[in-house]
Amino acid sequence: MAPAFALLSVAIAAVCFLPPPVVVQACKSVGSNRTFADCSNLPYLSASLSWTYNHTTGTLSIGFAAPPVAAGGWVAWAINPTGKGMVGSQALAAFQGADGKMVVKTYNISSYGPIKESKIAFETADLAAESANGMISIFGTLTVGAHVRTVNQVWQSGASVTNGVPDKHPMDGGHLNSTGILTLTDSVSPAPARESSTGERNGSNLLYFFIFIFLLF
Ligand SMILES: *[C@@H]1O[C@H](CO)[C@@H](O)[C@H](O)[C@H]1NC(C)=O
Ligand SMILES: *[C@@H]1O[C@H](CO)[C@@H](O)[C@H](O)[C@H]1NC(C)=O
Ligand SMILES: *[C@@H]1O[C@H](CO)[C@@H](O)[C@H](O)[C@H]1NC(C)=O
Ligand SMILES: *[C@@H]1O[C@H](CO)[C@@H](O)[C@H](O)[C@H]1NC(C)=O
Ligand SMILES: *[C@@H]1O[C@H](CO)[C@@H](O)[C@H](O)[C@H]1NC(C)=O
């Protein structure tokens, strides 16, 4: 009886203290050998975003991947600090430059109509682009500020580039709906709110365990 009980207790304890299942988000590869803490498939344009955010330094490293509308086209990813759509977007766009190499350019998009390369509201570093298997990837680090919870993201793709300027994107539903909110949780050490909820969960596991033991007697 005693050994059976001990065994049962151990089994129950094992179940109670099992870590919560980790939800692994299946994301398309963003190419190269860069790694990011988080990753999400975006709901339009077959795009995905991988990112690592550091709450302390306020830096957001991203890897965005999407297929251009046609070979020789472009893809872009942006943060819009002032609204939800294209106007106001602080954009990174990638396409093949005149020399055949992939380039990333920044655009402060202040109106509809032709876009012009310009400085953006965020400090940028390590901008790079890659093209492989029909996908273009954009990499870079943006200083978005410390302890930011959410940013409005906008992404886009187009079919062609003329004289180094991305041409207007298609106007179908997917290309008009490609905006959303990106939630920035601290990528390595958990945010304080998360830590406390994990603590409570362990506490309640422990409580259930003792209630169970109590009921056994
Ligand atoms: C709470 O549980 C999680 C996983 O279930 C574990 O990583 C963490 O260390 C535990 N915390 C404490 C205080 O036991
Ligand atoms: C892959 O990682 C190695 C070592 O860190 C680095 O030298 C190389 O440039 C990386 N390759 C790409 C494509 O980023
Ligand atoms: C972006 O454009 C807007 C509107 O023209 C302007 O007010 C803002 O200062 C520009 N931002 C940067 C970083 O140049
Ligand atoms: C875009 O959004 C609108 C309004 O939310 C919706 O009616 C439409 O179906 C969406 N288009 C696509 C292609 O999902
Ligand atoms: C954020 O950056 C600081 C300074 O580089 C570093 O010490 C810290 O470990 C980073 N935090 C995370 C969660 O990576």
Image: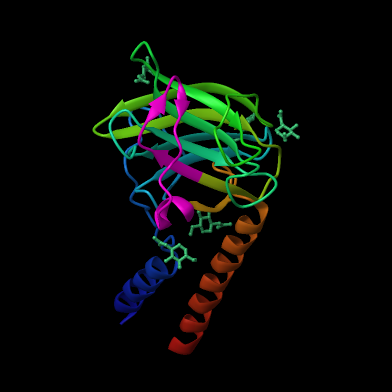
> As drawn, is 108 to the left or to the right of 19?
right
On whether residue 167 falls in the magenta region, the answer is: yes
Residue at figure coordinates x 60%, y 49% from the top left: 152
What residue range appears in magenta? 155-177
Q: Out of 54 and 115, give the one closest to the viewer.
A: 115
Place of residue 122 in the rendered image (x, y in percent of width and height, measured from the top left): 66, 31
Residue at figure coordinates x 43%, y 62% from the top left: 20
Place of residue 81 in the rendered image (x, y in percent of width and height, measured from the top left): 68, 44
Give above or below for 187 relative to 9: above
Q: Out of 39 and 71, give the one closest to the viewer.
A: 71
Q: Quadrant of residue 118?
A: top right
Residue 43 visible in image:
no
Place of residue 204 in the rendered image (x, y in percent of width and height, measured from the top left): 56, 73
Location of the N terminus by quadrant is bottom left
User: Exactly how many numbered labels are in the figure?
Assistant: 0
Give above or below for 42 relative to 207: above
Residue at figure coordinates x 59%, y 50% from the top left: 85
Q: Out of 205 and 101, give the one closest to the viewer.
A: 101
> As drawn, is 66 to the left or to the right of 106?
left
Residue 10 visible in image:
yes
**Colouring:** rainbow
Q: Quadrant of residue 159?
A: top left
Residue at figure coordinates x 43%, y 70% from the top left: 16
Q: Out of 119 and 193, give the one closest to the viewer.
A: 119
Give above or below for 187 relative to 132: below
On whether residue 160 falls in the magenta region, the answer is: yes
Place of residue 50 in the rendered image (x, y in percent of width and height, measured from the top left): 44, 41
Give above or below for 94 relative to 2: above
Q: Quadrant of residue 162?
A: top left
Q: Residue furthest top?
A: 99
